[in-house]
Amino acid sequence: MKNMRCLVIFDMDGVIIDSEPLHLSCEKEIFELLGISISKEQHLSFVGTTNKSMWEQLKKIYNIPQSVTVLVKQQQSIYLELLKKDKTINPIPYVETLIKSLHENGYILGLASSSPHSQIDYILDRLNLKPFFRNIISGDDVKNGKPNPGIFQKISAVSRISPENCIVIEDSFNGVIAAKNAGMKCIGFKNPNSGNQDLGNADLIINSFSELTPNMIYRLLIE
């Protein structure tokens, strides 16, 4: 890598692991318990944002009596239980190779996920990927979730790297918009299990991490 401090920021769900189907299954279970009917399109519109943000919106729409805090805790509990039972959790193909290659080439890596720290820590520990990330920011650490840019602004600040030297890898519309609103370049990963997400605002769209190299990311940053 050339003499420039670069921060590559990974989302986790749908980028590092293919967890969106598990998230959707968990949320669908809670919707059924609450007796509310949500269309698939509406459900997929929440991909990439925080649990808190999702439940704040749904509580208003459906007059759900439970507090947002109770709903979030219920969701986190069910999801973590499902996650621990799932023996098939593996990194998305080629993403582990990309992470290690970027690290070896001197890039600073960060993770900015809407998931709570408990889930992030469990997944990164299970996949032995935590040592590669200098800073990890969770949806717990910011007031507003994606598409608000706060999560990316925070990781830029704690990493002491300006937004123009940051590039985000995202799989959701909300995530791409958040990255662009933070003044960062963004690579959109087309994950079919994340639904038909509109990634059109990304600077580059890929279908596989085998398409990416550290040099490609560097060239995209300096364009």
Image (cartoon, rainbow, N blue to C red):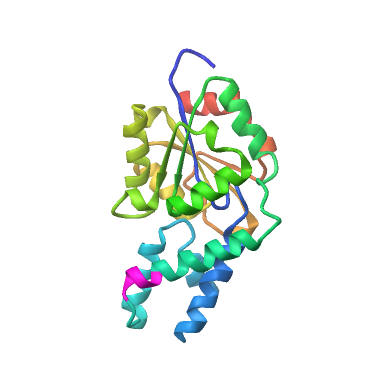
Q: At 46% from the left edge and 68% from the top edge, which residue is drawn?
A: 75
Considering every residue shown, the one lying at the far top of the view is: 3
Q: Nearer the viewer, residue 202 or 40?
A: 40
**Above or below: residue 9 compared with residue 16:** above
**Above or below: residue 91 compared with residue 216:** below
Q: Is residue 163 left or right of residue 43?
A: left
**Above or below: residue 202 compared with residue 223:** below
Q: Is residue 223 visible?
A: no
Specify start and end residues of the magenta stretch as a single range: 67-71
Residue 25 magenta-drawn? no
Q: Is residue 67 visible?
A: yes
**Above or below: residue 92 compared with residue 161:** below
Q: At 56% from the left edge and 25% from the top edge, which residue is drawn?
A: 103
Whole-percent x and y of residue 198? Answer: 52, 55
Q: Nearer the viewer, residue 101 or 210?
A: 101
* Secondary structure mainly formed by the magenta segment: helix
Whole-percent x and y of residue 186? Answer: 48, 39
